[in-house]
Structure formats: C-alpha cells, structure tokens
Amino acid sequence: MSESTKNLSDIVTKLKEIDNVFKFGEKMIPVIEGFVSFISDFVPFVEQVSGSIQDSRSKIPEASNQIDKVTNATELAMTEVLDKIDEINIDLNDISNCLDDMVEHRIRAEGYVTELCKEIKDNENAKVIFKKLLESIDVGLTLEMMKNKVRQITANTDQITMSLQVQDITAQQLAAVNHLIISVQHKLGGLLEAFNSTGYNSSDNLEISKLPDVHFDANASYNPSSNQQDDVDSIIKNEKASQEEIDKLFS
Amino acid sequence: MDRKFLVVDDSVTMRRIVVNTLKTLGYNQYVEAEHGKDALDKLSTDSGINFVITDWNMPVMSGLELTRAIRSDDKTKTLPILMVTTRGVKEDIVQALQARVSNYVVKPFTPQILKDKIDLILSN
C-alpha cells in the first residue's frame, strides 16, 4: 500500500470516529436537556431550603436569649428567697438565744424555789399553794417544745437551701442546651455560606453569633440523696489510700 | 472565728447559698469571686483569705485551673481548698485530688455536709 493510500484510510477512520461522536451527542442531547430541566426545577427548591435555614437561624439568637432570660429570672428569684431564708435564720438564731436565756432563768428560779421551800418549813398549806403556783407558771415543757420547733424550722430552712441548689443545676443544663443551639446556628451559617459559594446569594447575611464562654456540666443532675456524697467520700478515701500506698513504695 | 473565706462560683445563687451557710456556722468574713481568674486577683490583693471554696465549671478559669494555680504559687500553696461541684463521677474526683484539692463536695449539699468538710479540713 502506498503512503498516500494509507493516509486516506486514516482520514476515513478519523471521519468515522467524528461521525460516531456526533451520533452519540445526538443521543445525549435529551439527557442533557433533562438534566438542565431538573436543575431549573431544583433551584427554587434550593432557594426554599436556603430561606428556611436562614429563617431558622434568625430565630436561634431569640431562643438563646429566652433561655438566658429564664436563667437570669430564676437566679433573681432564688436570691430573693435566699435573702428571706437569711432573715429567717437570723430570727431563729435570736429566738434560740432567747430560749437559752429562759432556760437559764428557769434553772435559777428552781434554786430560789428550793431555798424558799426551806423557809416555809412546816407550813403544809403554804407548801401546797406554792407547789400549785409553780405548776401553773412552769414553762419547762413549753420551752423544750419551742426549742424543738426552732430546730425543726432550722432543718426545714436547711432543706430549702439544699433544694434551691437546683437553680444552679438547671442553669447548667440550660447552658448546655444554649450551647447546643448556638452550635446549630454555626452549622446553619456554614450551610448558608456553602449556598453562597455556589452562586446563590442570600438576601440577608446574618452575623453568626460567637459561641458564649459558658462552662457547664452537661450531666449535672439534682439528686438530693445523701448517698451521692457518701459515694464521693468513699472514692476520696480509696484514692487517698492508693496514693499513700504508692508514696510508701517510693519512700 | 478567725477565718476568711474566698467563695468562688459563677452562679450568684450558689455563692449566696455558700455564704449563708458560712454565716450560719459562725463564719462572717468572706470574699466572693465569679471565676478562677477573679479569685486569683482577690488572693493577690487580700492576704487575709485563708480558706477557698470553689466551684469547678466556671468561665474564664475553672476551679480545677484555679486549684493548680494556687498550689503552684509559694504564697498560696498551703491554702485549704474545698471543691463544691455538680461533677460526681470518679474520674473528676480523681482529677481534683491530683490537682490537690483538700476535699470535695457534690451539689446539692446540706449545710451540715459543708460544715463537716470545713471542720475536717481545718482539723487536718
């Protein structure tokens, strides 16, 4: 085969390949048209999703503020209650001191009574009347009852003080929720930025609020049982013991 | 009583509860701080403070960081430190002991528990 014949054969082969490409292109056109149509339909959906994200994101700071307001309001209320408990404790302390004074007076009075009985000597009628008089003015039992009441009220205020610690525990739980929703806001902000980078411009660029510098125990729970402190004491005891054993090995 | 307490907690309610309890126990001298850094500032300006009661979870500087800072300073390293916190799991308690807190109380606590721990620390 001559050189010119070989060249012509190559050209024919290339032309056939080009023809195949055109034929494939003709077949692909409906597919591409379908894809373009799908994208055209998809854009409003993306806009709708973006709008929803923006809307949700704009509501998050409000929700976060509401949580902060709840925490602040309960903290204020608790402080007021604690003020009153403080006043009650001061009053109880005063009452307790007064009762102690009264008990001392009574002990002194009993001494005087003994002395007086000696002075009355054989006057039995005077002794009977005097005994009745003492019984009618004796406040010993009343004093004891009042002291018990004071102890009971003190125990109740202690219990209230313990219960009020629930405010700190719920505040930590709310701080955890707040942190979570602000994190969601950050994620949504990231999604909006992704939309913007694809050419879709959001109409409202909301500023992403910074994550607050709040430290909390997300596992904080209100457990007034004394077992909790017992468990802690037991751990401390064991840990201290094991540390002492380690220290002994090194000494 | 010759004791001046530094009460460190970011919660106003908790500071108030601890202070009220201290007053009930007869301790009337106290200073309050909102976080660890604030506490260190108070310690550097008030040499009369001789007992620290601190929360763990606080902004700026935690109670654990505060404990480490106190223990690493020659002027304050022997101060009694009572950690009062909601964190009650063993890992946390061990971490606090390693930072050398003097004792550990979990919230919620009764005034009696706080008294017992203060007495125990002071007796040691």
Image (tube, coloured by chain):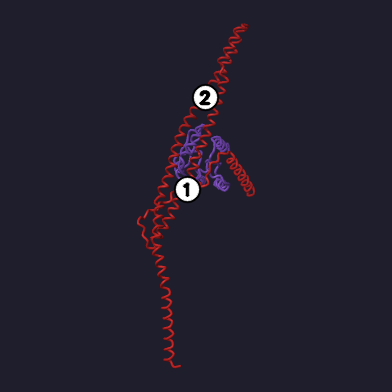
Chain colours: A red, B purple
Tell me the quarter of the picture where residue A140 sits: top right
Describe residue A42's horizontal placement relative to residue A237 as left or right.
left
Identified by mark 1, the residue type is: Val
Mark 2 lies on residue = A97
Tags 1 and 2 touching, CB below 8 Å: no
> Is residue A44 depicted above or below B86 in this figure?
below
Can the viewer see residue A142 in this picture? yes
* First reached walking from the N terminus: tag 1 or tag 2: 2
Q: Is residue A233 above or below residue A189?
A: above
Residue A240 placed where, x, y %? Answer: 61, 44
Tag 2: amino acid: Asn
Residue A180 image offset from top left, x and y in percent? 47, 50
Give the residue displayed 64% in from the left and 47% down from the top.
A245
Residue A177's tag is 1
SS at circle 2: helix
Give x and y (percent) for residue B27: 50, 33
- Most extreme residue toward the left is A203
> Disc 1 sits on a residue from what chain?
A
Q: Is disc 1 placed on a helix, strand or loop?
A: helix
Q: Residues within 10 Å of mark 1 (few under 14, many from 20)?
A: some
Q: Is residue A36 left or right of residue B118?
A: left
Q: Compare residues A168 and A188 and report the one nearer the observer.
A: A188
Relative image position of residue A195 (x, y in whole percent):
40, 60
Q: Chain of mark 2?
A: A
> In the picture shown, does residue A117 fall above or below B112?
above
Q: Are the numbered discs 1 and 2 placed on the same chain, yes or no? A: yes
Nearer the viewer's eye, disc 1 or disc 2?
1
Q: Nearer the viewer, residue A164 or B87?
A: A164
